[in-house]
Image (spheres, grey):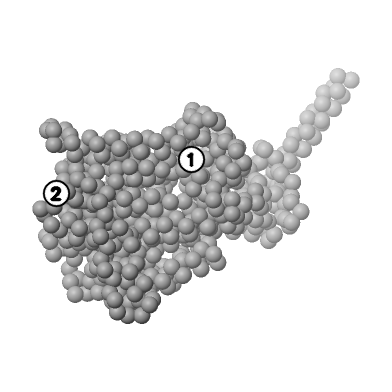
Amino acid sequence: MRRAGAIFCAVVATALLGLFAAATATAEGTTPVPSGFPATPDDYAVSPEEAVKVADTDPKIVARKAELTSKDTLTANVKAESVRIWEVGYYLNGEKVNLVIVDGQTGEATQSWTGPAVDWPMARGKPGQFGHILNSPWVWIPLALVFFAGLFDFRRWRKWVHLDLLVLLAFGISQAYFNAAEIGTSVPIVYPLLAYLLARMLWIGFRGHGLDRSAGEGLRPSIPVWLMTTAVVALIVLRLAGNLADSGVIDVGYAGVIGADKITDAKPIYDDSFPEDNPTGDTYGPANYFAYVPFEEALPWSGSWDDLPAAHAATIFFDAATLAGLFALGLMLVRRRRSVEDPDDDAAEDDLLAPAPPEEPPARGGRVRRRLAAWFPDREGNVLGLTLVFAWVAYPYTAFVMQSNSNDELVSALIIWALVLFAGPLARGSLLGISGMAKFVTLPLFPLFAAGGRGIRLRTREDRRHALRPLVLFTLAFLFFTAVLLAHPAVDPGLKMFWERTVETQLDRESPFSIWGQNDLEWLQTAVKAGVVVLGIAVAFVPWRRTLIQIAALAAAVIIGVELVLEHWFYLYIPWFLGPLLVAMAARDADDISADAPYPRLL
């Protein structure tokens, strides 16, 4: 009996082992699935067991198995996605090393990934994932040619700014590798380009324009004004059409809509309650979500990641605000320069808000022409403003933001308008506080903007008179708007949760989309960080007298410096520094006037 009982137990144990093996591997040699197989969705023609069998035949998996030693364990996990595909993930000794995508209808292995692409879908070169139609060479290359040819001075082609234009377009080389899922090449290409632009902005910020005056006269396009105007109108129409007809909303824009919905429903933003398809959407400052509120109110969120019309509307508005700011800045630069041409007029520099009388419009011409002339009487200012607007709408990576419907142009608009209103410490302090509470990347601009048109000097009574009053006004405005925006998360769920969900999350972020994430270069990253901190502080003191063009250049330099040390970098971040960079490039030496000079009426 004892022998029979032992035999019976052995048979039962063998049967149980067989059942377990059948649950984890459907055939000899199939990779085991410890977590078990999920149910097959109704609209799938391929079972998860069959998906693993197909994935096991992928060449990369076959090669992986051939490299295994007796100490290695290779397991798989399979899950269904909403787009009728099976994702089969392979784990070597518990670490995810391979991913195979199997079509749920045909049973064909359509994609196979190793390296960063296993955990990062954006590293897989998915067509249209970002930028949509802009990823087509038949769209990107003509737009790049329009940008370069439209801003090129054919009369004086040996100008430093022409090289600047080429460097700006060279980000497209990196993007081509990114679209081919070769981020090991695309990422390193970015850093020499950023370093060059940083050096150029530092040169203009500290020394003025190029190595000699001829190289630093700014952008002076050869194309006639009427043609540039026509191009601007056409490009704006194309941007709007592209946004409405062929664009998607990435997780960034989606997060803005979710946060706005929470605000209108009187719910906390930072409370771990973002939906599963956007769990880390609350990593931005509160101003970002408040900016989406009017658009979410007009076009309410459905509760799912659909077309998200509110995100489209917000992106279009941010772009329009940036364009208006660039035109106003170009117009203002020329008119401010003229308003302080008299070197004996000391009152203008003391009265920061003193308006200059508008020029009389021409009396002749039709009614429409007279009305336009009354609105924009300064032809030279119009040309500079138009050049800035053209550069913005023709540059591919501003359209890239439009096609992705992200929140990055919100930062651009706020920085540009802070430059437009720079002569007023209250205005620039308010706008910098709002932008810093939208995306923290602009907070390092505080010392530069606090110093204003004069570097901070307190040695003499005259130095203190010029420095302390605007410094105090700027700081009060900055702190006021920062405190107002922080009041919402402070009440619920508290500043501790706000810190954890935003700053701490960003600091702890790991990403393969930077040289720091791809390589062990912590010592170099620390050194660059220290350099950026020194730069951010130094621009508050030197140069002592700076012009608005120098302010724009130094602002671009500080933002570029911050981008150089980011753990995660992407092409959507280019517009953060593009606005002030274009101002520094486009304005000529004659427009280089004191940043504290009064600004006249724009219209």
Q: Residue 346 carries which label?
A: 2
At numbered mark 2, what does the secondary structure look like: helix, strand or loop?
loop
Q: Callout 2, which amino acid?
A: Asp
User: Quick one: 527 or 102, which is closer to the camera?
Assistant: 527
Mark 1 neighbour density, 10 Å: few (under 14) some (14–19) many (20 or more): many
Q: Of discs 1 and 2, which sits in the foreground? A: 2
What's the residue at 13%, 33% (across, down)?
Answer: 461
- Point out residue 176 in the picture as x, y percentages from the top left corner: 41, 61
What's the residue at 33%, 62% (across, down)?
Answer: 603
Name the quadrant of the N terminus. top right
Specify the quadrant of the image occupied by residue 584.
bottom left
- Point out residue 558 in the picture as x, y percentages from the top left corner: 29, 45
Decide: is 110 above or below 377: above
Q: Looking at the image, which residue sits at the far top?
A: 2
Along the horizontal axis of the image, is 319 left or right of 449?
right
Q: Looking at the image, which residue sits at the far left?
A: 344
- Point out residue 110 in the picture as x, y percentages from the top left corner: 59, 59
Q: Is residue 198 visible?
A: no
Q: Callout 1, which amino acid?
A: Pro
- The mark nearer the N terminus, 1 or 2, is 1
What's the residue at 37%, 35% (across, down)?
Answer: 479
User: Quick one: 453 or 554, which is closer to the camera?
Assistant: 453
C-alpha gap between disc 1 and disc 2: 42 Å
Q: Which mark is residue 286?
A: 1
- Point out residue 502 in the picture as x, y percentages from the top left corner: 47, 36
Q: Is residue 501 visible?
A: yes
Specify the quadrant of the image occupied by residue 153.
bottom left
Decide: is 536 above or below 406: above
